[in-house]
Image (spheres, grey):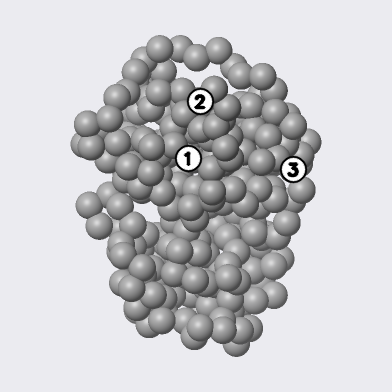
């Protein structure tokens, strides 16, 4: 039975919303789980074992990344992104919901990647797979055949930026640099002028904090008319800041893709500040 196109709810959706719209013809659910090295967890294997019904795996750690750069998980070229997400059935009018098995950790990266490739109808599942299960909704381990290829065409914009861009904004009064790493890592070395916003401070019990609290957090760090430049260890948790900023009404937001992995490398030559 044909179902009308779902109205886009915004960048964050509840498990209740997804449960109500899971069978929508234009709804595509993607598991974007990625785990830090040393956790001895594999996102793809866990997806195969347990996932939201119908969800496919969005592999930005091993497949949907720039294969020509010796940096982890960098945004791929447009043609690779187009080919990869078409295989997942993504169309130009698809409403994509991304989630991960860490409540909320790696899925905002997938959300920002779609936004960076010109697709605006994409949202993050608040609380991820854990919230879905806690709500009592069904999960399964049934393998799913790849859908009919979609017609999505990536058109890259500047939501991800490089080191040259960051360098040009270090002393820009219109820009505030926010670093999502933990305080101890930040104090051991950061970009000049950066402010620390550990991503965990934006979350409460695995879900995004209420909008009024997010607005207060950002207001304490940056003026309303300032651009936000988000960074972290390797471009993953910076996207949690980007998501929170988007939800709280901030429009000028970019993410430094390579983040501290590139900037903080001994051979980089980029300026570094250390807290005394």
Cα distance in 3D space between marks 3 and 2? 19 Å
- What residue is disc 1 on? 98
Q: Residue at point 64% right, 69% down?
A: 166
Circle 3: element type:
loop
Q: Which mark is residue 154?
A: 3
Question: From the viewer's perspective, is 104 left or right of 123?
Answer: left
Question: From the viewer's perspective, is 25 left or right of 187?
Answer: right
46 up-or-down from 36: above or below: above
Of callouts 1 and 3, the N-terminal one: 1
Cα distance in 3D space between marks 1 and 2? 10 Å
Q: Residue at point 43% right, 53% down?
A: 12
Q: Which of 259/48 is in front? A: 48
- Report crowding for label 2: few under 14, some 14 to 19, many 20 or more residues within 10 A (C-alpha): many
Of callouts 3 and 2, the N-terminal one: 2
Circle 1: element type:
strand
153 up-or-down from 232: above or below: above
44 up-or-down from 16: above or below: above
Give percent across and percent down for residue 223: 49, 85
> The C terminus is located in which quarter?
bottom left
Circle 2: element type:
strand
Q: Residue at point 53% right, 77% down?
A: 176
Q: Residue at point 54% right, 22% down?
A: 1
- What residue is disc 2 on? 56
Question: From the viewer's perspective, is 113 left or right of 69?
Answer: left
Asked if disc 1 and disc 3 are in contact, CB closer than 8 Å, the reply is no
Of callouts 1 and 2, the N-terminal one: 2
Residue 247, picture quadrant: bottom left
Give percent across and percent down for residue 189: 44, 67
Give percent across and percent down for residue 227: 58, 76
Cα distance in 3D space between marks 1 and 3? 18 Å
Q: Which of 139/44 is in front? A: 139
């Amino acid at each position: 039975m044909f179902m009308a196109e779902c109205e886009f709810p915004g960048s964050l959706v509840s498990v209740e919303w997804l449960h109500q719209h899971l069978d929508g013809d234009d709804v595509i659910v993607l598991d974007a789980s990625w785990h830090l090295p040393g956790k001895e967890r594999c996102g793809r294997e866990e997806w195969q074992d347990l996932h939201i019904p119908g969800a496919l795996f969005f592999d930005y750690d091993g497949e949907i990344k720039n294969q020509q750069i010796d940096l982890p998980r960098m945004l791929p070229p447009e043609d690779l992104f187009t080919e990869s997400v078409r295989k997942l059935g993504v169309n130009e009018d698809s409403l994509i919901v991304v989630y991960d098995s860490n409540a909320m950790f790696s899925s905002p990266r997938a959300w920002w990647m779609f936004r960076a490739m010109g697709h605006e109808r994409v949202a993050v599942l608040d609380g991820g797979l854990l919230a879905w299960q806690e709500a009592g909704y069904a999960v399964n381990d049934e393998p799913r055949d790849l859908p009919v290829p979609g017609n999505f065409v990536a058109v890259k914009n500047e939501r991800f930026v490089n080191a040259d861009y960051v360098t040009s904004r270090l002393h820009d009064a219109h820009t505030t640099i926010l670093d999502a790493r933990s305080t101890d890592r930040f104090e051991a070395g950061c970009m000049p002028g950066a402010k620390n916003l550990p991503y965990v401070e934006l979350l409460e019990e695995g879900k995004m904090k209420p909008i009024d609290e997010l607005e207060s957090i950002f207001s304490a760090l940056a003026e309303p008319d300032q651009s936000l430049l988000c960074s972290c260890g390797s471009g993953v948790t910076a996207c949690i800041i980007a998501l929170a900023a988007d939800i709280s009404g901030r429009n000028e937001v970019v993410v430094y893709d390579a983040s501290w992995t590139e900037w903080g490398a001994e051979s980089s030559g980029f300026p570094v500040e250390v807290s005394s």
